[in-house]
């Protein structure tokens, strides 16, 4: 029987781990929606104070959540990985995540949550995580092709994330296997300094770090992962199972989120947020994150499907990579057991289909 959502104080009485209590996140009772409306429903939403949370900030700033009757309580986390435990317990209603071996292993151990919408897709038009190679290696001709990376040190953000699957596809295109290079694991913010001191030869680095590295002149954008891996689902919106049970509130939240996504995508022009049309979006996101507006206009933004559709083919491809690396503990986790597209489908049914021109995500998407 599923444990009902309770307040943080009551949860403490049943000995939640201290690390979980430290988040201070309160859930939403399934009984909170009264009379078929979402009036005065509180929703706790995890964020990492990054531009990847742009649609959340846009929807909050433009009143889309408020129009649904929702009171949004943003909770800051050092990383998306730290949202998984409070989402699983119901102490956090909504969060974001990057599918990884660790994520799937947590689900296999009983962490109950749902993957519900797109939060970040990399495609040819929006390569916001390029392969960077140290500039001196390129200038000297030591690295001309992917095959020249054999035996060299490549930085990834962490072990066995979706980025590892990305790199494996690129190495395969160069006639190599994943372990034909040396792997080091560094947060994206550490890549610039490590390139500068010669500690790494290449990296897969997300924005804005990729632009900062390029501007510093220590590494160059060498290749585009989608050329070799295809469009990739790098980030997803997650619901706690308790919040997902509150169908009305969960759909109200999704409507606000999708409206935020559409405003965000509408601000794109030639793969950037650099035009006057983007002024409002740039202000909202940089005010929320502290990023300098001029930098935000220069970076390659992460693409998000304007109807929130997930690229299921990409999720399966990366999961199969984790299986091949023997990184999945216990029984495999069928994706259809954790993916729930009903909320985004209901939101789009009410909002209508997105009609403006936008890059389409290749691969199988949720209907």
Image (cartoon, rainbow, N blue to C red):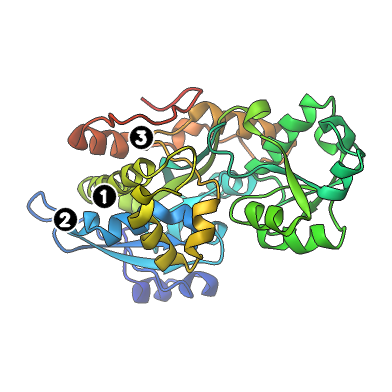
Q: Which residue is mark 1?
A: 256
Image location (x, y in percent) of residue 355: 28, 29
Image location (x, y in percent) of residue 141: 91, 38
Q: Nearer the viewer, mark 3 or mark 1?
A: 1
Task: Give the SS element for disc 1.
Answer: helix
Q: In front: 279, or 35?
A: 279
Give how far apart the Cα atoms at labels 3 and 1 are: 16 Å
Q: Nearer the viewer, mark 3 or mark 2?
A: 2
Q: In front: 334, or 12?
A: 334
Q: Which residue is mark 3?
A: 341
Q: In front: 224, or 184?
A: 224
Give how far apart the Cα atoms at labels 3 and 2 are: 23 Å
Q: Is residue 52 visible?
A: yes
| Position of the C terminus by quadrant | top left
Q: Residue at x 48, y 30 (%)?
A: 311
Q: Are marks 1 and 2 in contact (CB under 8 Å)?
A: yes
Q: In front: 50, or 103?
A: 50
Q: Residue at x 36, y 59 (%)?
A: 57
Task: Give the SS element for disc 3.
Answer: loop
Crowding near the residue tagged with mark 1, few <14, some 14–19, many ≥20 C-alpha atoms within 10 Å: many
In terms of sequence position, does the residue under pointer 3 or pointer 2 come before the other? 2
Q: Is residue 165 left or right of residue 3?
A: right
């Amino acid at each position: 029987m599923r444990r009902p959502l309770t307040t943080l104080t009551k949860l403490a009485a049943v000995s939640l781990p201290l690390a979980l209590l430290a988040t201070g996140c309160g859930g939403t009772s399934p009984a909170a929606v009264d009379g078929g409306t979402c009036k005065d429903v509180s929703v706790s939403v995890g964020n990492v104070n990054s531009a990847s949370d742009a649609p959340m900030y846009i929807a909050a700033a433009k009143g889309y959540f408020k129009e649904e009757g929702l009171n949004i309580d943003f909770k800051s986390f050092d990383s998306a990985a730290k949202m998984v435990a409070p989402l699983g317990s119901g102490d956090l209603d909504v969060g974001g995540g990057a599918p990884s071996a660790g994520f799937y292993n947590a689900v296999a151990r009983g962490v109950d949550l749902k993957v519900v919408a797109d939060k970040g897709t990399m495609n040819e038009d929006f390569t916001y995580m390029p392969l960077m190679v140290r500039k001196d290696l390129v200038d000297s001709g030591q690295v001309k092709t992917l095959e020249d990376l054999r035996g060299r040190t490549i930085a990834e953000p962490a072990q066995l994330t979706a980025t590892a699957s990305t790199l494996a596809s690129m190495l395969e295109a160069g006639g190599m296997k994943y372990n034909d290079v040396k792997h080091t694991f560094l947060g994206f913010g550490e890549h610039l300094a490590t390139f500068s001191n010669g500690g790494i030869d290449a990296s897969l680095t997300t924005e804005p770090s990729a632009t900062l590295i390029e501007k510093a002149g220590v590494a160059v954008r060498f290749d585009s992962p989608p050329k070799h891996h295809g469009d990739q689902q790098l980030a997803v919106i997650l619901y706690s199972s308790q919040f997902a049970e509150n169908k009305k509130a969960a759909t109200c939240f999704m409507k606000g989120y999708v409206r935020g996504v559409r405003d965000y995508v509408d601000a794109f022009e030639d793969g950037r947020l650099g035009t006057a049309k983007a002024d409002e979006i740039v202000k909202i996101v940089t005010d929320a994150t502290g990023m300098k507006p001029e930098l935000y206009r220069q970076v390659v933004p992460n693409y998000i499907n304007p109807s929130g559709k997930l690229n299921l083919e990409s999720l399966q491809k990366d999961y199969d990579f984790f299986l091949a690396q023997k990184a999945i503990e216990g029984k495999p986790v069928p994706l259809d057991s954790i993916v729930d597209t009903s909320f985004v489908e209901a939101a789009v049914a009410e909002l209508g289909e997105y009609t403006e021109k936008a890059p389409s995500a290749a691969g199988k998407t949720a209907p």
